[in-house]
Amino acid sequence: MGFGLLFIGYFAASMGFVSVLRLLGYMLTTYSAKKLKQYNTAFGYFEIASGVMVVVSFVTTVLDLLGLLMGEGFVNESVITVIRHAEVLLACACNIVMLWSIRSIAIDTEEKKISFGAVRNSVFVMIYAVAYLVSLLPFEFMKYLSLPLIIVQLVWIIFNLVLIFSCYAKICDESDVNMERKPSRFAFVNEMRAQSDARQKEKEEKWAERAEQRKKRK
């Protein structure tokens, strides 16, 4: 469906301390967003936001390569600093777009916990973005914000990874559900699977009904 690719791409983009890894991560998230917008149009906005991050990551990758090949002084330090700050803030914006896309599909599939998690994580990202902007102010005590910023960033990255994995586990395409599955030797496992499949089928029927209603309104 796309959430598996999103998980891998998001992990690479967020935990990638090397610009090339971030670039590859954002390329993967863009592709996953393209797949997911087939199920919910909100992911079209995330596709655009992630595409912007591909361009930004490409620029930082080029700058890093020039720094390695030509020396650190080859590119103006002020220009690099501005681009780095812009990359951080644009990444925050991209995360918020992603989270609200997830909230949209969670509402469609009636996954209330995922919907709540998307809103909660958005708050963390926005707090980080504001704190990051404050840390750029030319005051001496701002240097003490470095560690809290790192901690907050790690928190929302981990929360987002958990949320995306929850989407992968709980929101799936009908074709994924209908794949043949070998019965377990344990009766309770088969019973749990049957109950899970029944809930998923009910959600799909409601999802299809809502999609049909939206088409009629148009």
Image: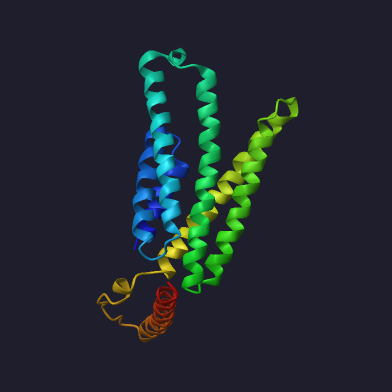
Colour scheme used in the picture?
rainbow
Rendered image quadrant of residue 122 = bottom right
Residue pictured at 52% horizontal, 66% vertical: 114
Q: Position of residue 205 (x, y in %)?
A: 40, 81
Identify the residue at the far front of this view: 218
Residue pictured at 42% horizontal, 69% vertical: 171
Q: How many marks?
A: 0
Residue pictured at 56% horizontal, 46% vertical: 154
Q: Position of residue 33 (x, y in %)?
A: 38, 55
Q: 103 or 140: which is nearer to us?
A: 103
Up-down relation of residue 141 to residue 103 (above or below): above
Q: 37 or 19: which is nearer to us?
A: 37
Going by the image, does 175 lie left or right of 76? left
Q: Split into 4 quadrants, where in the image is the N terminus?
A: bottom left
Residue pictured at 55% horizontal, 32% vertical: 85
Rendered image quadrant of residue 209 = bottom left
Q: Split into 4 quadrants, where in the image is the C terminus?
A: bottom left
Q: Position of residue 10 (x, y in %)?
A: 43, 49
Q: 144 or 25: which is nearer to us?
A: 25
Going by the image, does 141 lie left or right of 154? right
Q: Position of residue 87 (x, y in %)?
A: 50, 35
Up-down relation of residue 210 to residue 160 (above or below): below
Up-down relation of residue 96 to residue 75 (above or below): below
